[in-house]
Image (spheres, grey):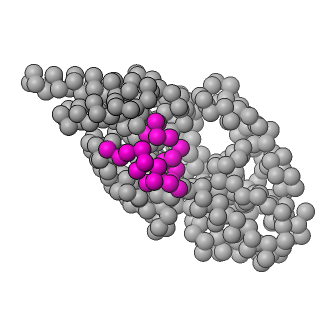
Amino acid sequence: MAPTPHPMALHDIRRHALTLGFADVGLAHLDLGEDIAHFEAYVTAGFHGEMDYLARNIGLRAAPAALQPGTVSVLSLRMNYLSDTVDSAMSALRDPERAYVSRYALGRDYHKRMRKQLATLAEWMATALAPHGYRVFCDSAPSLEKALARNAGLGWIGKNTLLLNRDAGSLFFLGEIYTDMPLPVGSGEAAQAECGRCQACLKICPTDAFVGPYRLDARRCISYLTIEQRGPIPKPLRRAIGNRIFGCDDCQLVCPWNRYAQRSEAPDFAPRHGLDRASLLDLWWWTEAQWQTRTEGMALRRAGWSGWRRNLAVALGNAPFSADICTALGEGRIGADALVIEHIDWALAEQAQKGHSTAAT
Ligand code: SF4
Protein backbone atom coordinates (compact mmCIF):
# COMPACT_ATOMS: atom_id res chain seq x y z
CA MET A 1 0.00 0.00 0.00
CA ALA A 2 1.18 3.53 -0.77
CA PRO A 3 1.91 5.90 2.13
CA THR A 4 -0.95 8.01 3.47
CA PRO A 5 -0.84 11.46 1.83
CA HIS A 6 -1.48 14.71 3.69
CA PRO A 7 -5.08 15.53 4.70
CA MET A 8 -5.51 18.11 1.93
CA ALA A 9 -4.49 15.67 -0.80
CA LEU A 10 -7.93 15.56 -2.41
CA HIS A 11 -8.02 19.34 -2.60
CA ASP A 12 -4.69 19.32 -4.42
CA ILE A 13 -5.81 16.52 -6.73
CA ARG A 14 -8.92 18.48 -7.68
CA ARG A 15 -6.92 21.60 -8.39
CA HIS A 16 -4.54 19.72 -10.65
CA ALA A 17 -7.36 17.74 -12.33
CA LEU A 18 -9.01 21.01 -13.39
CA THR A 19 -5.81 22.09 -15.13
CA LEU A 20 -5.92 18.84 -17.12
CA GLY A 21 -9.39 19.54 -18.47
CA PHE A 22 -11.47 17.58 -15.98
CA ALA A 23 -14.60 19.28 -14.74
CA ASP A 24 -14.74 17.59 -11.35
CA VAL A 25 -13.28 14.79 -9.25
CA GLY A 26 -14.42 12.96 -6.15
CA LEU A 27 -13.36 10.10 -3.95
CA ALA A 28 -15.82 7.22 -4.18
CA HIS A 29 -16.85 5.08 -1.27
CA LEU A 30 -16.77 1.47 -2.40
CA ASP A 31 -20.11 0.12 -1.19
CA LEU A 32 -21.68 -1.16 -4.41
CA GLY A 33 -23.99 -3.83 -3.03
CA GLU A 34 -27.30 -2.40 -4.28
CA ASP A 35 -25.81 -1.43 -7.60
CA ILE A 36 -24.52 -4.93 -8.19
CA ALA A 37 -27.96 -6.36 -7.41
CA HIS A 38 -29.48 -3.91 -9.93
CA PHE A 39 -26.85 -4.85 -12.49
CA GLU A 40 -27.41 -8.58 -11.99
CA ALA A 41 -31.15 -8.11 -12.48
CA TYR A 42 -30.40 -6.23 -15.73
CA VAL A 43 -28.27 -9.07 -17.05
CA THR A 44 -30.69 -11.76 -15.86
CA ALA A 45 -33.49 -10.02 -17.77
CA GLY A 46 -31.33 -10.17 -20.90
CA PHE A 47 -31.44 -6.38 -21.31
CA HIS A 48 -27.76 -6.38 -22.30
CA GLY A 49 -28.54 -8.06 -25.63
CA GLU A 50 -25.42 -9.20 -27.48
CA MET A 51 -23.07 -7.39 -25.10
CA ASP A 52 -21.91 -10.64 -23.51
CA TYR A 53 -18.94 -8.94 -21.86
CA LEU A 54 -21.39 -7.27 -19.49
CA ALA A 55 -22.46 -10.64 -18.11
CA ARG A 56 -18.88 -11.65 -17.38
CA ASN A 57 -16.74 -10.61 -14.42
CA ILE A 58 -19.55 -9.35 -12.23
CA GLY A 59 -17.33 -10.06 -9.22
CA LEU A 60 -14.77 -7.60 -10.57
CA ARG A 61 -17.45 -4.94 -10.86
CA ALA A 62 -18.52 -5.53 -7.27
CA ALA A 63 -15.08 -5.13 -5.74
CA PRO A 64 -12.57 -2.63 -7.16
CA ALA A 65 -9.75 -4.43 -5.32
CA ALA A 66 -10.58 -7.57 -7.29
CA LEU A 67 -10.17 -5.67 -10.55
CA GLN A 68 -6.95 -3.97 -9.48
CA PRO A 69 -5.29 -5.73 -6.52
CA GLY A 70 -4.31 -3.40 -3.72
CA THR A 71 -6.93 -0.76 -4.54
CA VAL A 72 -8.09 1.10 -1.45
CA SER A 73 -9.30 4.31 -3.12
CA VAL A 74 -11.14 5.09 -6.33
CA LEU A 75 -11.12 8.59 -7.74
CA SER A 76 -13.97 9.31 -10.13
CA LEU A 77 -13.59 12.13 -12.62
CA ARG A 78 -15.78 13.73 -15.23
CA MET A 79 -14.93 15.67 -18.37
CA ASN A 80 -17.44 17.72 -20.39
CA TYR A 81 -17.69 16.97 -24.10
CA LEU A 82 -20.47 19.11 -25.57
CA SER A 83 -18.90 21.28 -28.25
CA ASP A 84 -22.05 23.26 -29.09
CA THR A 85 -25.43 23.78 -27.45
CA VAL A 86 -28.25 21.39 -26.66
CA ASP A 87 -30.44 23.51 -28.97
CA SER A 88 -28.13 22.99 -31.92
CA ALA A 89 -28.18 19.24 -31.27
CA MET A 90 -31.98 19.40 -31.23
CA SER A 91 -32.09 21.25 -34.54
CA ALA A 92 -29.87 18.61 -36.21
CA LEU A 93 -32.10 15.90 -34.81
CA ARG A 94 -35.24 17.56 -36.16
CA ASP A 95 -33.97 17.87 -39.72
CA PRO A 96 -34.80 14.51 -41.35
CA GLU A 97 -32.40 15.10 -44.23
CA ARG A 98 -29.47 15.52 -41.87
CA ALA A 99 -27.65 12.78 -40.02
CA TYR A 100 -27.74 12.77 -36.26
CA VAL A 101 -24.56 11.52 -34.60
CA SER A 102 -24.54 11.25 -30.84
CA ARG A 103 -22.76 14.34 -29.54
CA TYR A 104 -20.12 12.36 -27.69
CA ALA A 105 -18.90 10.79 -30.93
CA LEU A 106 -18.42 13.87 -33.11
CA GLY A 107 -14.73 14.31 -32.34
CA ARG A 108 -11.77 12.23 -31.30
CA ASP A 109 -12.36 8.92 -29.55
CA TYR A 110 -12.90 9.97 -25.94
CA HIS A 111 -11.26 6.84 -24.52
CA LYS A 112 -7.88 8.05 -25.71
CA ARG A 113 -8.08 11.55 -24.34
CA MET A 114 -9.61 10.44 -21.04
CA ARG A 115 -7.07 7.69 -20.41
CA LYS A 116 -4.18 9.98 -21.28
CA GLN A 117 -5.36 12.69 -18.90
CA LEU A 118 -6.17 10.17 -16.15
CA ALA A 119 -2.68 8.68 -16.44
CA THR A 120 -1.14 12.17 -16.37
CA LEU A 121 -3.02 12.95 -13.17
CA ALA A 122 -2.05 9.63 -11.58
CA GLU A 123 1.60 10.29 -12.42
CA TRP A 124 1.34 13.77 -10.92
CA MET A 125 -0.06 12.18 -7.74
CA ALA A 126 2.96 9.87 -7.60
CA THR A 127 5.30 12.82 -7.76
CA ALA A 128 3.40 15.40 -5.72
CA LEU A 129 1.80 13.19 -3.05
CA ALA A 130 3.34 9.74 -2.75
CA PRO A 131 4.47 6.86 -4.95
CA HIS A 132 1.47 4.63 -5.58
CA GLY A 133 0.24 1.66 -7.55
CA TYR A 134 -2.65 2.58 -9.85
CA ARG A 135 -4.66 1.82 -12.96
CA VAL A 136 -6.87 4.15 -14.94
CA PHE A 137 -10.13 3.24 -16.62
CA CYS A 138 -12.58 4.87 -18.94
CA ASP A 139 -15.36 2.65 -20.16
CA SER A 140 -12.69 0.00 -20.56
CA ALA A 141 -13.03 -2.44 -17.68
CA PRO A 142 -15.70 -4.19 -15.64
CA SER A 143 -16.39 -1.31 -13.30
CA LEU A 144 -19.67 0.31 -12.21
CA GLU A 145 -18.49 3.75 -13.18
CA LYS A 146 -21.79 5.58 -12.77
CA ALA A 147 -22.29 4.13 -9.30
CA LEU A 148 -18.72 5.04 -8.37
CA ALA A 149 -19.24 8.57 -9.67
CA ARG A 150 -22.40 8.89 -7.62
CA ASN A 151 -20.55 7.54 -4.57
CA ALA A 152 -17.90 10.17 -5.22
CA GLY A 153 -20.47 12.95 -5.03
CA LEU A 154 -20.39 13.78 -8.75
CA GLY A 155 -24.16 13.46 -9.13
CA TRP A 156 -27.00 10.98 -9.01
CA ILE A 157 -28.14 8.24 -11.37
CA GLY A 158 -31.22 9.50 -13.19
CA LYS A 159 -34.24 7.61 -14.41
CA ASN A 160 -32.53 7.51 -17.82
CA THR A 161 -29.76 5.42 -16.12
CA LEU A 162 -27.13 8.13 -16.69
CA LEU A 163 -25.21 10.16 -14.15
CA LEU A 164 -26.72 13.61 -13.68
CA ASN A 165 -25.10 16.61 -12.10
CA ARG A 166 -26.96 19.68 -10.85
CA ASP A 167 -24.49 22.06 -12.47
CA ALA A 168 -23.66 20.16 -15.65
CA GLY A 169 -26.48 17.81 -16.68
CA SER A 170 -25.17 14.56 -18.14
CA LEU A 171 -23.15 15.41 -21.25
CA PHE A 172 -19.76 14.40 -19.89
CA PHE A 173 -17.45 11.41 -19.84
CA LEU A 174 -16.52 9.48 -16.71
CA GLY A 175 -13.20 7.91 -15.81
CA GLU A 176 -11.56 6.44 -12.74
CA ILE A 177 -8.19 6.10 -11.06
CA TYR A 178 -7.93 2.98 -8.93
CA THR A 179 -5.08 3.46 -6.48
CA ASP A 180 -3.47 1.84 -3.45
CA MET A 181 -3.06 5.32 -1.94
CA PRO A 182 -5.25 5.63 1.18
CA LEU A 183 -6.88 8.97 0.42
CA PRO A 184 -8.84 10.71 3.19
CA VAL A 185 -12.15 8.91 3.64
CA GLY A 186 -15.48 10.60 4.10
CA SER A 187 -15.00 13.18 1.39
CA GLY A 188 -17.20 11.49 -1.19
CA GLU A 189 -20.81 11.91 -0.20
CA ALA A 190 -23.52 10.86 -2.61
CA ALA A 191 -25.48 13.73 -4.15
CA GLN A 192 -29.23 13.82 -3.60
CA ALA A 193 -31.32 12.35 -6.44
CA GLU A 194 -33.17 15.19 -8.15
CA CYS A 195 -35.37 13.58 -10.82
CA GLY A 196 -38.44 14.11 -8.69
CA ARG A 197 -41.66 13.37 -10.59
CA CYS A 198 -40.14 14.07 -13.99
CA GLN A 199 -40.44 11.28 -16.56
CA ALA A 200 -39.44 13.20 -19.68
CA CYS A 201 -36.66 10.78 -20.67
CA LEU A 202 -38.90 7.74 -20.29
CA LYS A 203 -41.58 9.29 -22.50
CA ILE A 204 -39.34 10.69 -25.25
CA CYS A 205 -37.51 7.46 -26.04
CA PRO A 206 -38.34 6.81 -29.72
CA THR A 207 -38.20 3.03 -29.35
CA ASP A 208 -39.71 2.70 -25.84
CA ALA A 209 -36.48 1.22 -24.54
CA PHE A 210 -37.23 2.11 -20.91
CA VAL A 211 -39.02 -0.70 -19.17
CA GLY A 212 -39.45 1.68 -16.25
CA PRO A 213 -37.44 4.26 -14.32
CA TYR A 214 -33.77 3.23 -14.05
CA ARG A 215 -34.40 0.21 -16.28
CA LEU A 216 -33.24 0.29 -19.89
CA ASP A 217 -33.66 -2.61 -22.28
CA ALA A 218 -30.61 -2.13 -24.49
CA ARG A 219 -32.12 -4.36 -27.16
CA ARG A 220 -34.53 -1.53 -27.99
CA CYS A 221 -32.09 1.33 -27.39
CA ILE A 222 -31.00 3.16 -30.55
CA SER A 223 -27.47 3.53 -29.21
CA TYR A 224 -27.22 -0.24 -28.93
CA LEU A 225 -28.95 -0.90 -32.25
CA THR A 226 -26.77 1.49 -34.25
CA ILE A 227 -23.43 0.83 -32.54
CA GLU A 228 -23.21 -2.43 -30.63
CA GLN A 229 -25.48 -4.76 -32.56
CA ARG A 230 -23.85 -6.33 -35.57
CA GLY A 231 -26.81 -7.91 -37.38
CA PRO A 232 -29.98 -6.52 -38.91
CA ILE A 233 -31.88 -3.83 -37.09
CA PRO A 234 -35.31 -5.24 -36.20
CA LYS A 235 -37.81 -3.97 -38.76
CA PRO A 236 -40.43 -2.83 -36.23
CA LEU A 237 -37.86 -0.38 -34.79
CA ARG A 238 -36.44 1.06 -38.00
CA ARG A 239 -38.89 3.92 -38.53
CA ALA A 240 -38.47 5.07 -34.95
CA ILE A 241 -34.73 5.43 -35.49
CA GLY A 242 -35.39 8.42 -37.74
CA ASN A 243 -32.15 10.14 -38.77
CA ARG A 244 -30.02 8.79 -35.89
CA ILE A 245 -27.08 7.07 -37.59
CA PHE A 246 -24.76 6.59 -34.61
CA GLY A 247 -26.19 6.58 -31.13
CA CYS A 248 -29.05 8.60 -29.71
CA ASP A 249 -29.17 11.46 -27.22
CA ASP A 250 -32.90 11.96 -26.85
CA CYS A 251 -33.09 10.98 -23.19
CA GLN A 252 -30.34 13.50 -22.47
CA LEU A 253 -31.49 16.34 -24.71
CA VAL A 254 -34.92 16.31 -23.13
CA CYS A 255 -33.60 16.21 -19.58
CA PRO A 256 -34.18 19.54 -17.84
CA TRP A 257 -30.82 19.27 -16.10
CA ASN A 258 -29.08 19.52 -19.44
CA ARG A 259 -30.11 23.15 -19.55
CA TYR A 260 -26.99 23.43 -17.45
CA ALA A 261 -24.80 21.29 -19.71
CA GLN A 262 -21.31 22.77 -19.87
CA ARG A 263 -19.50 23.16 -23.15
CA SER A 264 -16.03 21.88 -23.81
CA GLU A 265 -13.44 23.94 -25.63
CA ALA A 266 -11.17 20.90 -26.06
CA PRO A 267 -10.17 20.65 -29.74
CA ASP A 268 -10.32 16.86 -29.39
CA PHE A 269 -14.09 17.01 -28.94
CA ALA A 270 -14.77 19.46 -31.77
CA PRO A 271 -16.84 17.92 -34.58
CA ARG A 272 -14.84 16.43 -37.42
CA HIS A 273 -15.89 16.49 -41.10
CA GLY A 274 -18.98 18.60 -40.32
CA LEU A 275 -20.60 15.59 -38.67
CA ASP A 276 -22.64 17.75 -36.34
CA ARG A 277 -24.79 18.87 -39.28
CA ALA A 278 -23.90 16.66 -42.27
CA SER A 279 -26.55 15.68 -44.78
CA LEU A 280 -27.45 12.00 -45.00
CA LEU A 281 -26.75 11.95 -48.71
CA ASP A 282 -23.31 13.51 -48.33
CA LEU A 283 -22.36 10.79 -45.85
CA TRP A 284 -23.86 8.11 -48.06
CA TRP A 285 -21.46 9.07 -50.85
CA TRP A 286 -18.38 8.51 -48.67
CA THR A 287 -16.44 5.58 -50.09
CA GLU A 288 -15.14 2.86 -47.79
CA ALA A 289 -11.60 4.25 -48.21
CA GLN A 290 -12.80 7.72 -47.23
CA TRP A 291 -14.68 6.31 -44.25
CA GLN A 292 -11.55 4.47 -43.09
CA THR A 293 -9.46 7.62 -43.35
CA ARG A 294 -11.98 10.06 -41.95
CA THR A 295 -13.01 8.01 -38.96
CA GLU A 296 -9.50 7.16 -37.85
CA GLY A 297 -9.18 7.84 -34.12
CA MET A 298 -12.93 8.35 -33.72
CA ALA A 299 -15.49 6.36 -31.74
CA LEU A 300 -17.50 6.12 -34.97
CA ARG A 301 -15.23 3.25 -35.98
CA ARG A 302 -17.07 1.01 -33.55
CA ALA A 303 -20.03 0.60 -35.90
CA GLY A 304 -17.78 -0.77 -38.65
CA TRP A 305 -18.18 0.09 -42.33
CA SER A 306 -21.09 -2.30 -42.80
CA GLY A 307 -22.88 -1.01 -39.69
CA TRP A 308 -22.34 2.58 -40.81
CA ARG A 309 -23.94 1.84 -44.21
CA ARG A 310 -26.74 -0.14 -42.58
CA ASN A 311 -27.55 2.80 -40.30
CA LEU A 312 -27.39 5.34 -43.12
CA ALA A 313 -29.70 3.20 -45.25
CA VAL A 314 -32.29 3.15 -42.47
CA ALA A 315 -32.05 6.93 -42.02
CA LEU A 316 -32.35 7.50 -45.78
CA GLY A 317 -35.44 5.29 -45.78
CA ASN A 318 -36.85 7.50 -43.04
CA ALA A 319 -36.07 10.76 -44.88
CA PRO A 320 -38.79 12.57 -46.86
CA PHE A 321 -39.28 11.20 -50.36
CA SER A 322 -36.53 12.23 -52.75
CA ALA A 323 -35.62 10.95 -56.20
CA ASP A 324 -31.97 11.66 -55.39
CA ILE A 325 -32.18 9.43 -52.32
CA CYS A 326 -33.76 6.61 -54.34
CA THR A 327 -31.00 6.86 -56.94
CA ALA A 328 -28.30 6.93 -54.29
CA LEU A 329 -29.76 3.93 -52.49
CA GLY A 330 -30.00 1.99 -55.73
CA GLU A 331 -26.37 2.71 -56.56
CA GLY A 332 -25.39 1.76 -53.03
CA ARG A 333 -26.51 -1.82 -53.65
CA ILE A 334 -23.51 -2.33 -55.95
CA GLY A 335 -20.78 -4.11 -54.03
CA ALA A 336 -22.65 -3.94 -50.71
CA ASP A 337 -22.83 -6.93 -48.38
CA ALA A 338 -26.05 -8.84 -47.75
CA LEU A 339 -26.79 -6.97 -44.51
CA VAL A 340 -26.56 -3.57 -46.16
CA ILE A 341 -28.51 -4.67 -49.24
CA GLU A 342 -31.39 -5.84 -47.07
CA HIS A 343 -31.50 -2.44 -45.33
CA ILE A 344 -31.23 -0.61 -48.67
CA ASP A 345 -34.17 -2.59 -50.03
CA TRP A 346 -36.17 -1.74 -46.93
CA ALA A 347 -35.27 1.92 -47.36
CA LEU A 348 -36.23 1.89 -51.05
CA ALA A 349 -39.61 0.39 -50.14
CA GLU A 350 -40.12 3.15 -47.54
CA GLN A 351 -39.16 5.80 -50.08
CA ALA A 352 -41.49 4.28 -52.70
CA GLN A 353 -44.37 4.28 -50.26
CA LYS A 354 -43.81 7.96 -49.46
CA GLY A 355 -43.40 8.72 -53.16
CA HIS A 356 -46.79 7.18 -53.92
CA SER A 357 -48.42 9.10 -51.09
CA THR A 358 -46.88 12.34 -52.34
CA ALA A 359 -48.07 11.67 -55.92
CA ALA A 360 -51.58 10.86 -54.73
CA THR A 361 -52.05 14.17 -52.91
S1 SF4 B 1 -35.47 13.60 -17.95
FE1 SF4 B 1 -36.32 13.85 -15.87
S2 SF4 B 1 -36.54 11.73 -15.09
FE2 SF4 B 1 -35.16 11.65 -16.85
S3 SF4 B 1 -33.12 11.76 -15.99
FE3 SF4 B 1 -33.73 13.87 -16.52
S4 SF4 B 1 -34.67 14.68 -14.60
FE4 SF4 B 1 -34.53 12.46 -14.38
Q: Quadrant of the N terminus?
A: bottom right
Q: Is residue 322 above or below residue 88?
A: above
Above or below 352: residue 89: below
Residue 130 location, x and y as percent? Answer: 84, 73
Query: Percent x, y for residue 90?
Result: 34, 49
Residue shown at 43%/54% (left/top)?
A: 294
Vertical arrangement, residue 252 with respect to residue 72, above or below: above
Q: Is residue 212 visible?
A: no
Q: Is residue 49 visible?
A: yes
Q: Specify the principal SS of the magenta part.
A: helix
Quarter-of-image position of residue 43 = top right
Q: From this viewpoint, which residue is outermost toward the bottom?
A: 128
Image point 84% across, 57% down: which residue? 72
For this view, does 124 lie left or right of residue 191?
right
Residue 208, by quadrant, is: top left
* Residue positioned 22% across, 22% down in the render: 353
Which residue is more in the foreground, 263 or 308?
A: 308
Highlighted range, magenta = 285-308
- Residue 360 coordinates in the image, percent (x, y): 10, 21
204 vs 326, nearest the viewer: 326
Q: Please tell me how many numbered marks the rendered image carries.
A: 0
Q: Quadrant of the C terminus?
A: top left
- Residue drawn 41% across the image and 59% down it: 271
Q: Verify whether residue 305 appears in magenta.
A: yes
- Give how far across and how far down residue 309 sits, in percent: 40, 37
